[in-house]
Image (cartoon, helix red, strand yellow):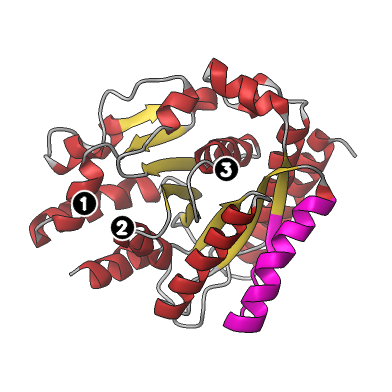
Amino acid sequence: MTDQAQTLRDLVMMRERERAARTSGQTPPRSARLITVTSGKGGVGKSNFTLNFALALQSMGKRVLVFDADIGMANIDVLMGISAKYNLYHLLRREKRIDEIIERGPGSLSLIAGGSGMSDLFSLSQNDLNYFMEEIETVAAQMDYIIFDTGAGLSQENFNFIQSADECLVVTTPEPTSITDAYALIKVVRARESGSVFKLIVNRAGDEKEAMQTADKIRVAAQKFLNVDIPLLGYISDDRHVVQAVKKQVPFSTAFPNCAASHEIRRIARRYMLVPASPEPGALTGIKGFMQKWLRRTK
């Protein structure tokens, strides 16, 4: 089955589930699903994954906002081939409203650049925090997914995003240091916040076998020492087209839609959409839940 045929089939299945929910009197959640994308170390292709994953979700009919939350190393706008005129700093200074700082990239993908405003985000007054919450809620109501692309490693800022989002996608590569650092990040977060939900993405895999072996090293250790299953959401091949697209400042799924990496990112997006979020009973979810958890941890 082709990617296009599979996508259409999956969309039909999702529409049928939504109709069934309405018929039964259940109202599908209107607030965006919040996803943190991170990695144990830099240089694993985390931001490139985030961008193309977002585009894949959007191509399947979902409304997606990417929030570049990588303090000091934000570069998704560069990968998009655009230059962000405004960023979070202008919102927090109340110079612009949130709809004015949203940039449009390939496929009209929505992006909020963190910029210097990211460091300010963690030291706002209660009044400014309330303003920020009101602004972010307005855009969250219009989105299906908000994806936070965080920095590599486990700074306090990254930890806040990971523990507050609905789930965290951890990007690793088959390199031993990448595997070790990815597991270390998961271990530290689970020790401090046992409710955090993780899924694995293996990037630059030589083939499916290497991807599975890479994921199993993390999964086995997590099951043995942390008593938690970290499922593999998917993998992306070590595809030369990815590097070529980065040089062109065009997403690889746009520049080379038929390359192996593009097929694999769409497969990951389809798999992700078909598995609903599974928060713990009583857990705060959506943007309000995110903000409440985030504020509680940063006071």
Q: Residues within 10 Å of mark 2 (few under 14, many from 20)?
A: some
Single out the residue that lies furthest toward the right.
1
Q: Nearer the viewer, residue 178 or 103?
A: 178
Q: Is residue 28 above or below residue 131?
A: below
Task: Measure how far apart labels 1 and 3 are at the Cα level.
Answer: 28 Å
Instruction: Look at label 3 and name its amino acid.
Output: Lys
| Viewer-nearest residue: 53 or 216 | 216
Q: Which residue is mark 3?
A: 62
**First to last magenta residue range:** 209-233
Q: Secondary structure at mark 2?
A: helix
As for residue 192 lying within the magenta part, the answer is: no
Majority secondary structure in the magenta region: helix
Say whether residue 206 is left or right of residue 35.
right
* 14 left or right of 74 in image: right
Nearest to the observer: residue 173 or residue 37: 173
- Place of residue 192 in the rendered image (x, y in percent of width and height, measured from the top left): 39, 78
Q: Residues within 10 Å of mark 3 (few under 14, many from 20)?
A: some
Residue 199 seen from this side: yes
Residue 132 rendering spot, x and y as whole percentages: 21, 51
Contact between labelled residues 2 and 1, with CB atoms less than 8 Å apart: yes
Q: For mark 1, what is the residue?
A: 121
Q: Please, what is the three-letter code of the amino acid marked with disc 2?
A: Glu
Q: Residue at x 77, y 40 (%)?
A: 8
Q: Is residue 233 above or below residue 266?
A: below
Q: Quadrant of the C terminus?
A: bottom left
State the mark number for residue 225: none
Closer to viewer: mark 1 or mark 3: 1
SS class, disc 3: loop
